[in-house]
Image: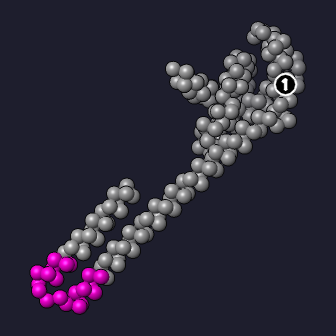
Amino acid sequence: MRKLQIVSLWVIALLWIGSAIGYIVISGEPKVELFFIILNGLGVIIAVLVSIYNGYNANVLKREQVNTQKFQVGFRYSENWTSDAIIDARSKTRSLIENSPTLEELSFAINHDNSVKTAIIKLANYWQTIHFLIERNMADEDAIRHFLSKPFLMWMERFRPWLASQEGQDKHVLEDLDDLFQRWKSNINEQST
């Protein structure tokens, strides 16, 4: 859009100059007043061109700043995956996965160990925050997906049945996690084909 506007204004400026020169040549008598009127009109056109160009550059710069900020937010939340609280929650769920291969054993272990249940809820909240940032376009999804898609997909495949079986749980959490799971799962499937 901006490019079309700039080109249009340049065409108008060139036509303005061409018609002024043509008028002066055809009339045979160059008038100083006419020359200054033409020059003033050209000044207005050039001022508009410069204004459009500056506005376009400001928009490009702002877009780049937003993209950089989104990447930084995505990277920061990806770094949180290695925070002490998340590492503790991951280790509890990892040991649970290794020791409880069936859903019944998994449910029994989770329901009888409050620290494991808390770890799963902490990780669910972490993933829901990631989903929120991506949905609101506050973080770069590609950066987050690059670092976290595999652990998230594995975690969801293992704990989704237990999360779905919890009565009284906020269903929005599971909906958000399912949405993120489908997005990232389909992206991995597209990359493998």
Number of marks = 1
Picture coordinates of residue 3 (x, y %)? Answer: 37, 57
Picture coordinates of residue 77 (x, y %)? Answer: 72, 40
Three-letter code, disc 1: Ser
Q: Is residue 172 above or below residue 32?
A: above
Residue found 56% across the figure and 53% down from its top: 64
Picture coordinates of residue 99 (x, y %)? Answer: 84, 12
Q: Which residues are magenta?
A: 20-39
What residue did someone put label 1 on? 91
191 or 76, which is in the foreground? 191
Picture coordinates of residue 81 (x, y %)? Answer: 77, 34
SS of the residue at dot 1?
helix
The secondary structure that dominates the magenta segment is: helix
Task: Evaluate whether residue 182 shows in this view.
Answer: no
In the figure, is residue 78 to the left or right of 39? Answer: right
In the figure, is residue 137 to the left or right of 166? Answer: left
